[in-house]
């Protein structure tokens, strides 16, 4: 598995280490299971750390398809692209382009910080932004300094 994930009530948190076709498939299955467990749309955030490699074309296609499925199961989808500079800005721009493929009625956004993403998530789930951050740090989804 090339990601770390955890759930807290109706919130799902993910940290991508590397995006692969198999990892996307596993992630979508996990989100489906959590949706069935909760019985209602979940709030979802994925952290993409600075050191995470840019996925290849096949993995990007799988990610786009996977995020379309995830968007149908979630009340909000937040993607956090960490880091600065041209390369990270380009990744943010491509990621924001995913929004064009996500159904218009869905809440999907690309954020610069976990703090911003968790603040928005807290408006759409039963967990406070502070508790989301606490669990994210505890589980290795967010590393100290990435807040």
Image: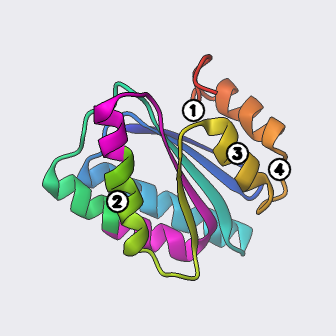
Compare marks 1 and 4 and give the one earlier in the sequence.
Answer: 4
Residue at 43% across, 68% down: 99
Establish if 11 lies above or below 55. below
Q: Tell me if I can see residue 1 in this picture.
A: no
Residue at 34% across, 59% down: 25
Establish if 43 lies above or below 102. above
In the picture as drawn, the residue positioned furthest to the top comes out as 144
Residue at 59% across, 36% down: 113
Compare marks 2 and 3 and give the one earlier in the sequence.
Answer: 2
Mark 4: few/some/many CA within 10 Å (<14, 14-19, 20+): some
Give residue 92's position: percent from left, percent from top. 39, 47
Which quadrant of the figure has residue 59?
bottom left
Residue that numbered label 3 is attached to: 118
Give residue 69's position: percent from left, percent from top. 44, 73
Report the disc number at residue 141. Answer: 1
Residue that numbered label 2 is attached to: 25
Q: In this view, does 74 lie to the left or right of 127?
A: left
Q: Give the secondary structure at mark 3.
A: helix
The answer to which of 92 and 68 lies nearer the viewer is: 92
Give residue 30's position: percent from left, percent from top. 51, 58
User: How far is mark 4 from mark 2, CA to CA?
Assistant: 27 Å
């Amino acid at each position: 598995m090339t990601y770390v994930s955890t759930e807290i009530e109706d919130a799902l948190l993910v940290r991508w280490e590397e995006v692969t076709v198999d990892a996307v498939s596993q992630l979508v299955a996990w989100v489906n299971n959590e949706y069935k467990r909760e019985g209602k749309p979940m709030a979802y955030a994925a952290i993409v750390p600075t050191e995470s490699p840019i996925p290849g074309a096949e993995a990007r296609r799988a990610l786009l398809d996977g995020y379309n499925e995830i968007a149908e199961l979630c009340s909000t989808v937040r993607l956090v692209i960490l880091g600065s500079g041209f390369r990270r800005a380009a990744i943010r721009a491509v990621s924001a382009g995913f929004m064009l493929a996500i159904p218009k009625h869905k809440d999907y956004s690309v954020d610069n910080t976990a703090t911003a993403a968790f603040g928005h998530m807290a408006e759409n789930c039963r967990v406070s932004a502070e508790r989301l951050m606490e669990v994210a740090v505890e589980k290795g989804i967010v590393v100290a300094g990435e807040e």
